[in-house]
Image (cartoon, rainbow, N blue to C red):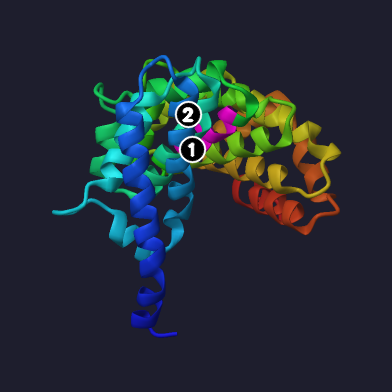
Amino acid sequence: MTALRHKQMCQPFISFIKEYMFKAEKLIQDSTGHNQLFKTDCVNIIQQSAINFSDDDIVAELMPHENNNYNTNVVELAFAHFNVKDAPTIKPCLIIIGQFIALSDKDTHEKYISDKYNLLQILKETLEEGSLSHKKDALWVLQSLAFDPAIANLIILDERNLIQQVLNCCSEKQYQIKQEAFLCLGTLVGETSLPKEQIFDHFVKQNAISVLHDELDQQKQYDHGVVQVLIIQTLSQFFTKIPGLAMMFLKNFGGKVFEDQQSSQHENVYLAASELMQEHYDCK
């Protein structure tokens, strides 16, 4: 299919999405604080629009430009209506914010973590008080931000101590939360450009290595190996960024946890553990 033909096929859907965004914005702006269900329905309309941002043509049409403020307005409304105490609106607002974060640049990320929008405070409140489903969404948004090294640094150094909230989620029993938390943690560690002393202070001193060890030791109950690989890769990143930490790990915990992973029935786990042992302990 040619690009022109694809574009022509997308146009009716683009118009449909624009129309619903416009209606949702108007309804939310006109609604009163006493009609929360009405406002929630409006936010849900926007959510359905945001879910479809994956198509490049639609994204190009909806991104702000001279005669188009739809996307900006939608995100503004999501921030305006976010309230951690108002459960029905949390997920739609986080999805809208997260979709836009994933599609935007560093300047936009910095804008939304500024005091005006206070996105990090929103994520902290959700990770502290939200349901498991809402925590999962908050971790996804946080990870999307962390792909930018400068933003990852800001998250790690932030006085709200979001790292502790992420580590708490790593220890949740629900697998989906655990996986999302380790994805977020691994991205923060992998992308940060902070010096080793600050990484040590903000992760190791908060027992991040103990959490990783304990969770890796318990992951035998899962049969797919995804979380094990995430933990092993995150430990390897820590060992690379903090010289001497690999030997400290060995002294405190021993090497059995890695040896157990090398005997895993899952090839991805075996390969990740073997690579870590070769790189950091010179085990052939």
Query: Residue 24's spot in the image, x, y percent?
Result: 37, 39
**Vertical order, 242 against 123 (above or below):** below
Residue annotated with mark 2: 40
Q: Is residue 100 rendered magenta in the image?
A: no
Q: Nearer the viewer, residue 75 or 103?
A: 75
Identify the residue at horizontal 57%, vertical 28% (top origin). 135
Q: Is residue 282 above or below residue 243?
A: below
Residue at image position (39%, 28%) is 155
Location of mark 1 (residue): 44
In the depicted view, which residue is nearer to us: 208 or 128?
128
x and y, in percent, of residue 68 in the image:
21, 52
Left or right, 284 with respect to 153, comes to: right
Residue 273 visible in the shown view: yes
Magenta-colored span = 134-142
Question: Image point 35% across, 42% down: which residue?
Answer: 23
Amino acid type at image mark 1 = Asn
Magenta: main secondary structure: helix
